Image (cartoon, coloured by chain):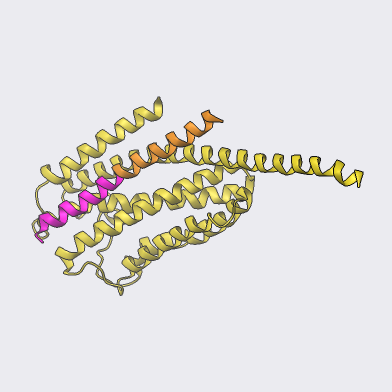
Chain colours: A yellow, B orange
Amino acid sequence: MKTRILGIAALLAVAGATIVGLFVVPPDLNQGDAQRIMYPHVASAWLAYLSFGTTALFGILWLWKRDLRYDAIALSGAEIGVMFTAFAIWGGMMWGRPVWGVYWQWEDPRLTTTALLLALYVGYLLLRRLTDDPERRATRAAIVGIVAAVDIPIVHFSVQWWRGLHQTATIASPDRALDPAAPMIFVGTLLGMVGAFTLTWAYLMIRRYQLARAELAREEEARLGRLRAVQAAAAVSAPQEATR
Amino acid sequence: MSDLGFVVAAYGVIVGGLGLYTVTLWRRLRAARRDDEGR
């Protein structure tokens, strides 16, 4: 019931933030309407970081505590993170074309490291399909999830470390935290969209975790069924062997 | 394509994709729970 209320709150928040982003906020003086893409683009990027950070953290917890519930949370983070990374890239491309004149540029460190982040966690999800053994799968996935998370700070700080097309942080850099360069209506709308997407993320994480637990229970049931069938076959063949 | 076209494409895919993923997740979860009850 609480999860359902969270889902309804998330739906209303996303609908409200979308309406504000599309119709209430004025166009930017330089970028015009294209600036409206910033809200879902930045919110998606933030949730990609949060998702993959969660995957890495719960991967560490799995390796430490050996509790498959941690692996289920890590999996949820990876799947949802891949979705938000794809959204961030799509939003960036739609914003880049009218503002930079190109959809994509491989020389840009932020773009390239984000594409690498997406590839790493798609690889994480594919790796999980290589084995049916839940413990072996969780261990392999945890190692990949932790190693891949090294790319998160590289993506985030790439705009400061190297030159490229992508702008530096507008409101998240420490020297601008209390005095953002963007007008307050833009900052407020951005924070609203980030809040709405974060609520949605929390809801999706809960539901994906529930699904992962149900899938694990089904797998376990199937494994036990196979084991029982093997034992039954052995029990049938053993007396026949003894009578020969 | 005009700036508004890019805005619509961005919001359409992101907000629409979020909705699509949520509905897909519900259906997967409901199917998994139905399997559990069937066992």
Residue A166: x and y, percent?
26, 66
State the extent of the magenta-drawn residues as a range.
B1-18
Residue at 61% x, 38% y is A221
Asked if residue A110 lies left or right of residue A60, the reply is left
Q: Nearer the viewer, residue A192 or A218?
A: A218
Front-most of A196 and A238?
Answer: A238
Residue that protrudes farthest toward the top in the picture: A1
Q: Taking A155 as reference, is B9 left or right?
A: left
Quadrant of the image occupied by residue A193: top left
Image label count:
0
Q: Is residue A179 visible?
A: no
Which quarter of the rendered picture does the N terminus of chain A lie within? Answer: top left
In this picture, residue B39 sits left or right of residue A115: right
Residue at 9 percent across and 59 percent down: it is B2
Is B12 colored magenta in this rendering?
Answer: yes
Residue A42 drawn above or below residue A195: below
Q: At x 35% / y 31%, what residue is drawn?
A: A6
Look at the magenta stretch and give its main secondary structure: helix
Q: Would residue A58 be counted in the magenta stretch?
A: no
Q: Is residue A101 above or below residue A15?
A: below
Q: Is residue A44 above or below residue A217?
A: below
Q: Nearer the viewer, residue A188 or A141?
A: A141
**Residue A183, image x, y percentages:** 15, 50
Percent coordinates x, y for residue A15 in the rendering: 22, 38
Residue located farthest toward the bottom when viewing the structure as drawn: A107
x and y percent of residue A124 in the render? 49, 57
Which residue appears farthest toward the front when viewing the image? A244
Left or right relative to A199: residue A100: left
Q: Is residue A97 visible?
A: yes
Q: Quadrant of residue A243?
A: top right
